[in-house]
Amino acid sequence: GSNFPLFYATGYLSFAMFAHLANRTAAAIRYSRPFLAYPSVTFVDALLARVVLNTLTHVAVIAIVIGGIFVIYQLPGPVDMASVFEALLLLTLLGSGVGVLNCYLMTAFPLWEHVWHILTRPLFLISGVIFLYDLMPAKAQELLWYNPLIHCIGLMRRGFYPTYEASYLSQAYVIAFALAPLLAGLALLERNHRNLLER
């Protein structure tokens, strides 16, 4: 397609959903510390609340912005809602996984939060937001394929561009990449959340 607003929105809004969800989930224990003093409230409740709230917010923003672009520019359909829905699920899983592990790391080691923000600054440029993965040099493709956001954003774009195949996609890779930090983070929080609350 030749519509730049749609191209940019499908990339940027997907990236923003991941980044904000990961950051908000990472702050779940610090944000919910007063509520966690109650025995009936667990750290899982705090994590789920942040994930659900931020996911719904971003889905609404994506629907409004992209819907507005379709109306303003009178873009033709159809939209592959299955690919869009799948991309949203993968972004939610990935953001939650990274966020849960960082929830432990940033609470246990406050310096990690600054290190994380420095390490992830180039992420916007290497996640396919501005440049199509398919048009990158072969050597860059070999390296960037391992960035799970490349797959999520490619899947989102496939939903809005019927002729875009994105043959490089691997949903299984994204799921595995997301589950590793999610399970590790949950295990660490299960063992250490009481100590973290006393900090």
Image (tube, rainbow, N blue to C red):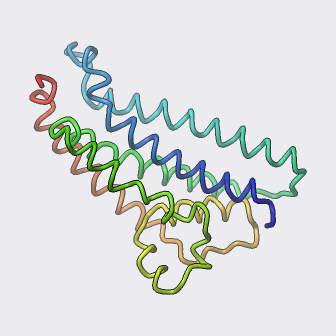
Report the number of numbered marks: 0
Frontmost residue, 133 versus 90: 133
Residue under the point 81% across and 58% down: 78
Depth check: 165 or 23 in front?
23
**Residue at the spot 50% in from the left edge and 57% down from the top edge:** 124
**Image coordinates for residue 56, horizontal then vertical, percent:** 55, 34
In the image, what residue occupies the spot 30% across and 42% down? 100
Q: Position of residue 68 (x, y in %)?
A: 79, 41
- Is residue 30 found left or right of 157 in the rendered image? left
Q: Furthest residue to the right?
A: 74
Classify the position of the N terminus by image quarter.
Answer: bottom right
- Residue 55, given in percent of the width and then of the height, sits at 51, 38
List x then y, in percent, for residue 172. Answer: 43, 67
Q: For this view, does 87 lie left or right of residue 24? A: right
Q: Is residue 37 above or below residue 189?
A: above
Outermost residue to the bottom: 138
Q: Quadrant of the C terminus?
A: top left
- Above or below: residue 183 compared with residue 29: below
| As drawn, 16 above or below 133 | above
Establish if 118 lies above or below 53: below
Q: Quadrant of residue 10?
A: bottom right
Which residue occupies 52% across, 45% down?
A: 17
